[in-house]
Image: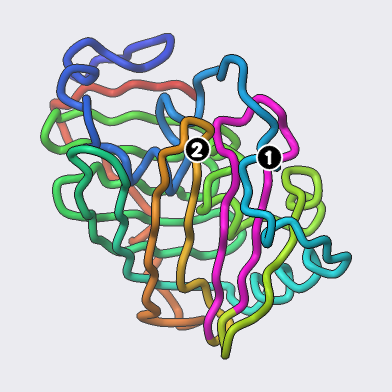
Amino acid sequence: MRRQIEGLGVGPVRTQVNRGLRHIVAIILLGLGPLAGAAPANVAPAMDRLPAADRLPAADALTALMDRLNQFQQLHLRFEQRVTGPGAERQQGDFYLQRPAQFRLESLDQPLVISDGETIYEYDALLAQLKLQSFDALDASSPAKVLLMSKAELSASFDVTFDAASGTAEHFVLVPTESTSLIAWVRMTFAGGVPSQITLMTQSKMQVSITLSLVSLNDALPASLFEFETPAGIDVIDDR
């Protein structure tokens, strides 16, 4: 029998098992979990934490970023994520995206995360546990949400600037407009019109670097990638 758990959706067993970096991929890339949801205290303005070269104003940076994001409707990327700090380790996996609001994140020893456009399914096979959230629960500062945003959403959520381009790569810096965000800034690099590097800095100065390599661009993706069938006999945490 499946067990419905109300409230925050973080059980004691899950909290113990997930200490450390086990869920850092879902927390950083998707904005799911305590990093995205906790309230910061005495946080300095995010812009003050950026290198001076990254503060160059650019009136057309937002338009330039949207031009790149609008180039894809379907995207399959392979990622490698590295986190700075003691005990940090690399995580690798695949990220599938389909506009307007579908994605799939899968990697070894990490929860499978799927958005069908309305609900986000976070399935931890090790704990036999499924967490359900609405798509709107995805943190605005998460790179996955940024890749799906409209121009109006980006403008409302970030101050966007960019560095000088180097070769075929173009670098954008996004600083959250929300003063309570735990994310200080997100740097996105594009190569050949698709994201190739995402670097994220938290207000606590933890840096996450995500290297992306293109597998397919605007090729039809199977509908089954964005569907989830709940296994029998698992705990279900419904936070929708």
Q: Is residue 224 left or right of residue 160?
A: left
Q: Main secondary structure of the magenta part?
A: strand
Residue 119 horizontal/vertical position (percent): 48, 39
Which residue has dot 2 on it?
Answer: 202
Which kind of residue does numbered mark 2 sit on? Answer: Thr
Which residue has dot 1 on it?
Answer: 48
Quadrant of the image for the N terminus? top left
Nearer the observer, 53 or 36 = 53
Give the magenta part as a residue range.
170-191
Residue 127 horizontal/vertical position (percent): 14, 28
Quadrant in the picture for residue 163: bottom right
Secondary structure under the numbered disc 1 in the rendered image: helix
Residue 115 horizontal/vertical position (percent): 45, 48
Residue neighbourhood size for the residue with mark 2, other residues' Cα within 10 Å, grouped as few (<14), some (14–19), many (≥20): some
Secondary structure under the numbered disc 2 in the rendered image: strand
From this view, report whether residue 167 is shown above or below residue 157: below
Q: Is residue 122 left or right of residue 231?
A: right
* Tally of numbered tags: 2
Which kind of residue does numbered mark 1 sit on? Answer: Asp
Nearer the observer, 29 or 188 = 188
Cα–Cα span, label 1 and label 2 = 13 Å
Residue 181 horizontal/vertical position (percent): 62, 30
From this view, report whether residue 78 is shown above or below residue 47: below
For image coordinates 80% across by 51% down, the residue present is: 155
The numbered mark, 1 or 2, whose residue comes first in the sequence reads 1
Nearer the observer, 82 or 105 = 82
For image coordinates 51% across by 81% down, the residue present is: 218
